[in-house]
Each structure stands twice: as structure tokens, then as C-alpha cells.
């Protein structure tokens, strides 16, 4: 782990709270996914990225008692990969899509929308499994 990486400590309650936030973000993304229109994909991907980030936090807190606390979400994916390589890769997918969704002026395509929803769902599912009973 990088010595300059900002981390925050937390316990089981923090892990559960981040998981609940992740689940609500995913629920919002899925709700927007019922709408049509070119702009919906950007909103869906942006919210799905937030779901994945919160889920990654929950997973890391549950496994190690700490989570990434900086602004570079690519680092958050690396921290998660240290806990679970495959889940870290799922978060990395979302993190790569996030800037275009949140700050871009181009519309995101259906393939990236599907990719983001799947990755977020995988991460929220893993966070739920790992924080139940925590």
C-alpha cells in the first residue's frame, strides 16, 4: 500500500452504513434505467459509480477495518483489489466511466450503461454478503 494513500478507519457499523448507501444508489440508478432518453445513461452510470464506490468502502471496512478516503477513485479500486482482485476490477470499470458520466458533455452509450449497472450490482451484492451480521 502506498504510504501517501489516505485511509479512514471504521468498524462494522460503518461498513453496514456504506453498504446501505450503496444499495440506495443502485436502487436510484435502476429507477432511472426505466426512463428513456439520451441523457439517462449519463445519470445511470454516474449513480452506478457512486454505488460501486460505497460498496467498495463497505467491503474494505468489513475485511480490514479501513477504506480509501481520498479523491482518486482509481486508488479506491486498488485498495479494494487488495481485498478481492475481481471486485477491485469491477470498481475499476466504474471508476473509468465516472468522469464521462459526471463531467462529460457527450452521451454515454447503452453498452457502458449495461456494464456500469452490472458492475454496481456485483459490488453491492458482495457488500451485502460481507456486511450481513457485521
Image (tube, grey):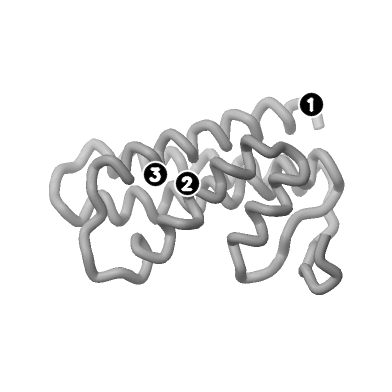
Q: Quadrant of residue 71?
A: bottom right
Disc 1 to disc 3, C-alpha distance: 25 Å
Please tell me which of labels 2 and 1 falls first in the chain: 2
94 displayed left or right of 134: left
Placement of 103 over or under 26, stated as above or below: below
The residue beneath circle 1 is: 133
Q: Which residue is located at x 13 percent, y 49 percent?
A: 37
Placement of 114 over or under 5, stated as above or below: above
- Element type where label 1 sits in the image: loop
Q: Nearer the viewer, residue 38 or 110?
A: 110
38 displayed left or right of 30: left
Disc 2 to disc 1, C-alpha distance: 22 Å
- Element type where label 3 sits in the image: helix
4 displayed left or right of 97: right
Q: Quadrant of residue 33?
A: top left
Q: Nearer the viewer, residue 25 or 79?
A: 79
Q: Residues within 10 Å of mark 1 (few under 14, many from 20)?
A: few
The residue beneath circle 2 is: 25
Residue contact at pointers 3 and 2, CB within 8 angstroms: yes
Percent x, y of residue 60: 75, 45
Q: Quadrant of the C terminus?
A: top right
Q: Which residue is located at x 28 percent, y 40 percent?
A: 111
Placement of 88 over or under 8, stated as above or below: above
- Element type where label 2 sits in the image: helix
Please tell me which of labels 1 and 3 falls first in the chain: 3
Q: Which residue is located at x 30 percent, y 69 percent?
A: 104
The residue beneath circle 3 is: 28
Disc 3 to disc 2, C-alpha distance: 5 Å
Percent x, y of residue 41: 26, 50
Amino acid at each position: 500500500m502506498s504510504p501517501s494513500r489516505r485511509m479512514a478507519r471504521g468498524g462494522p457499523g460503518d461498513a453496514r452504513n456504506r453498504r446501505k448507501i450503496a444499495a440506495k444508489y443502485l436502487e436510484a440508478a435502476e429507477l432511472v434505467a426505466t426512463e428513456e432518453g439520451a441523457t439517462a445513461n449519463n445519470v445511470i452510470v454516474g449513480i452506478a459509480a457512486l454505488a460501486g464506490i460505497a460498496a467498495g468502502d463497505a467491503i474494505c471496512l468489513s475485511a480490514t477495518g479501513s477504506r480509501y478516503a481520498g479523491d482518486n477513485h482509481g486508488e479506491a479500486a486498488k485498495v479494494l483489489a487488495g481485498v478481492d482482485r475481481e471486485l477491485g476490477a469491477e470498481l475499476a470499470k466504474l471508476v473509468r466511466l465516472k468522469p464521462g458520466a459526471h463531467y462529460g458533455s457527450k452521451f454515454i452509450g447503452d453498452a457502458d450503461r449495461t456494464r456500469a449497472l452490472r458492475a454496481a450490482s456485483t459490488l453491492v451484492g458482495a457488500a451485502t454478503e460481507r456486511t450481513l451480521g457485521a
